[in-house]
Amino acid sequence: MHQWQKVILDTTSMVASDRTTANKLEAVAERLRDAVTFLPLKDLRFANQPAEGHTWFMSSLNDTSISGGPQHLRFPSDSSKGRVLCLKGRDLHDGSWNYYALAWPGALPHNATFMIGLTFVSYNHYDYQNMWHGLSTLFPFVAWHQRHTCRLLPERWVLYHWGELRSGMSPWLSKLMEATFRKSPSIEVFDKIKEDSSICFEDAVVTRHNEGGMSTERMIEAYELLRCSVRRYCNLSSELDGDGNKVNTIRLTLLMRRGARSFRNESAVVGIFRRECDKVGGCRLTVAHSDDLSFCDQAKLMSTTDVLASPHGAQLTNLFLMDRNCSVMEFFPHGWLQYAGVGQYVFQWLSSWSGMRHQGAWWDPVGEKCPYPEGGLKCFDIYKNAQIGHNETHLSDWTRNVLGEMKLRKSAETVPNNKKQDPTSACACG
């Protein structure tokens, strides 16, 4: 056999071998593709404990938490064995009709759309339009972003409530995320995808436990990042005098509500606070309604507040935008202490998580007795949006003590000249 004939035979054999290998690999990929199993996003087997453990959202998967950081799922990762997250369905009313699956990048489901970049997938048990519930749900992404040195930015957000797709968040929350991630959140609703087709993500982070499992240290760090990011976004800074010391003015803000949970006699309450403020040298009183203020107006107001007094409500979510160690005074209608459950303490928790001092709460003791002997939600519905009265003696004493404590604390606060800096110049990451 001539040498050239041997070369031809060897080459033909190699081509045939490569083709055989390719066919085998394609067959394996096809089997892996066929093995992709879509499960309901909302697992009704866990309807009685929807927010516990693995939750009823993506119930077959277990979370990861690193060094006190947020509980989350990452795809692809070692725990997913290198598989990416795929979703199918865009039902707005029943999460059990929306589905998820894991697939290897080389064996995606047939007709799948592959989305490049980082995707944040959020589970909310309550509401994205409410400032507090929305922040609580998206806060873990801020902490995750911070621990990755703020380099990884989301290309899109996918929002779920009970497994049902949601198309938006409140304007306040959207501005907060824009300030933190340096671009307005792009919310994906899959409206350009065929309804029976799937979507797979190059990189995805899923959270479903809000702040659950995070250490206080990690939460304080993440709220510091939010505070700094908002002040940078709104071009704000802390008030310093010419020597770099914090101004000794005691800045007292009454953040009022209209309608539900407003003060029954707002002018009388304002008068009591004004009288006590006038007794403290350097005290300055501001009265505001959050629904009159833009996002940056609210941020500016909080950045110039040392003591925040307000009825319980979503507007109190702004409290983390104050300087660290500022004080909060909270007011409740009659009936809340008995019937509202643990949810009435969320702003005490937020104060702790963001480095503030919650100076207690006042529950209006005056009001009608609940007519339902079984109590519970039927009673709470009566009191939920009731107006709040006031006790002049208690409010005067309480305000005097909080203002006095703040004056002592501010008098002791100094920033050495050689360490002066604009706190918004660099937001801490990593």
Image (cartoon, rainbow, N blue to C red):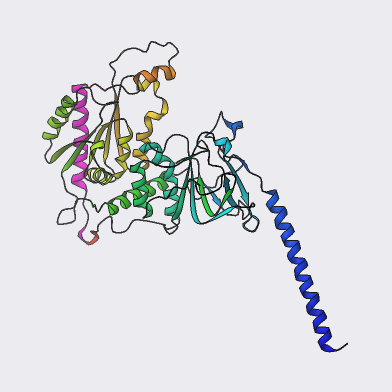
Residue 69 seen in the current view: no
Residue 44 vs residue 115, the one in the foreground = 115
x and y percent of residue 402 in the render?
22, 34
Dominant SS of magenta comes to helix
Specify whether 176 is left or right of 202.
left
x and y percent of residue 353 in the render?
37, 41
Q: Which residues are magenta?
A: 388-417
Q: Residue at x 80, y 82 (%)?
A: 8
Q: How many marks?
A: 0
**Does the magenta segment cover residue 78?**
no
Specify whether 369 is left or right of 29.
left
Residue 57 seen in the current view: yes
Residue 93 vs residue 60, the one in the foreground = 93
x and y percent of residue 3 in the render?
83, 88
Residue 334 sits in quarter: top left
x and y percent of residue 137 in the render?
44, 41
Quarter of the picture holding the N terminus: bottom right
Above or below for 214 versus 328: below
Above or below for 427 versus 405: below
Residue 100 vs residue 256, the one in the foreground = 100
Q: Residue at x 26, y 45 (%)?
A: 299
Q: Residue at x 43, y 53 (%)?
A: 145
**Does the magenta segment cover residue 415?**
yes
Q: Residue at x 26, y 23 (%)?
A: 388
